[in-house]
Image (spheres, rainbow, N blue to C red):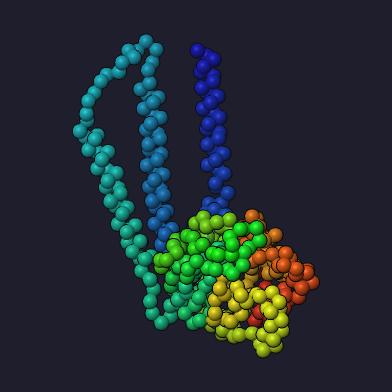
Amino acid sequence: MLERRHRIRLGVTLAAVALAVVALGGCGDSTGPDNGQNALRPEGPYSEKILNLFVPFFWIAVVIGIGVVVGTVFVAMRFRMKPGEDPMPKQTHGNTVLEVGWTLIPALILAVMAVPTVAVIFDLADQPKGKDVVEITVSGRQWWWQFTYDNGIVTANEIHIPAGVPVALTLEGPPACVNAGFEPAGTGTGGSCYDNGVNHSFWVPALNGKKDIIPGRQSFLKLEADKPGTYLGQCAEYCGMSHANMRMRVIADTPADYQAWVDRQLKPWSAQATQAFAPINKKWGCLGCHSADPEKPGSIAPNLTHLADRCKFAAEMFTLDEDNLTEWVHNAPGMKPFGPFAAAMPSFEEQGMTVQEANQIAKFLLENTGTSGSVPPAECN
Ligand code: CUA
């Protein structure tokens, strides 16, 4: 008997320690780590509304949860069978007050919680309209983001928005099954349909909740940042081998900085740059997939017109520098987990490109596609 009691006590102690470790492990910082993707650190009015809803409901749930656990433990201790007791307890049937109580009280709590919840749902679903509103169409691709602004700019993976101004996003998949015109090495796709138009989910936690992107349908989401800064996000719906590396960056600028960025983005390449790129494109066919027109999307790949104005490339996977870009141009699949199954860009090494040629292309892009005065731009730091 003593033996058994010891074992139970040991078990209870171990369980309590394990629970404490798990519970305390989440308490490094009262509002979680500052990793730039934290819904508990809202940086705009929409994300703030979500947090303001979440926090009181969380504490209500904590109080109810503690009540249930304490009540359960109390009843188990207080009414357990004692030595010499009749093993058959007193039988009761029905208790109207209790039954009505435990039905009505939760129903009331839920009804009260529903009022602000429904209000916030409608509030967040209301798309901003007006002259100041920036409208951007977001296309979820395998595996990167294409952004098309109402003012014509087409960019990838990184967007600039004016701080303190609502941004209306229209979310959609690729136009149709995208034909790459080539077969990514080793995929056996026959070069038929590269981007399968799968579901993605757009999520920048500091600026709003997430919204799925479903091919063939449009959905809407809005963003607003209180102040200038960088807000990170990533795809939140499994979409294939590179899902985990499908990130994005929102850079909120002052209105003046934003306008300056827009003006720079609308500028095409210089005549010299266009001329210098012609033989490269002729040999390797870059513009078969990419675009070098600031207002034209690439067929399956990011617009390169202002590549060096971005902080990173390959859906924010790599810092934009000469070494990384050379390696990427030479053998993109070699830089990604799952290789050709995760990179739309083929291996040009397999097509006979030398490292020197790849380096020339990388240098060309770094020297000709940046407009902010530094590569990467100052706001990346
Ligand atoms: Cu796109 Cu996950």
Examine the rendered structure and indicate whether residue 137 appears above or below residue 115: below
Would you say 53 lies left or right of 237 here?
left
Residue placed furthest toward the left: 96
The image position of residue 235, as x and y in percent, is 52, 60
Viewer-closest of 293 and 90 = 293
Viewer-closest of 62 and 188 = 188
Viewer-closest of 137 and 24 = 137
Residue appearing at x 53%, y 42% in the figure: 23
Residue appearing at x 59%, y 58% in the figure: 242
Q: Is residue 250 visible?
A: no
Q: Is residue 331 visible?
A: yes
Residue placed furthest toward the front: 190
The image position of residue 196, as x and y in percent, is 51, 62
Residue appearing at x 32%, y 12% in the figure: 86
Would you say 102 lies left or right of 343 here?
left
Q: State which quarter of the image contains the C terminus.
A: bottom right
Residue placed furthest toward the top: 84
Examine the rendered structure and indicate whether residue 240 appears above or below residue 99: below
The image position of residue 212, as x and y in percent, is 44, 61
Examine the rendered structure and indicate whether residue 187 appears above or below residue 13: below
The image position of residue 74, as x and y in percent, is 38, 29
Would you say 191 lies left or right of 55 here?
right
Residue appearing at x 47%, y 79% in the figure: 150
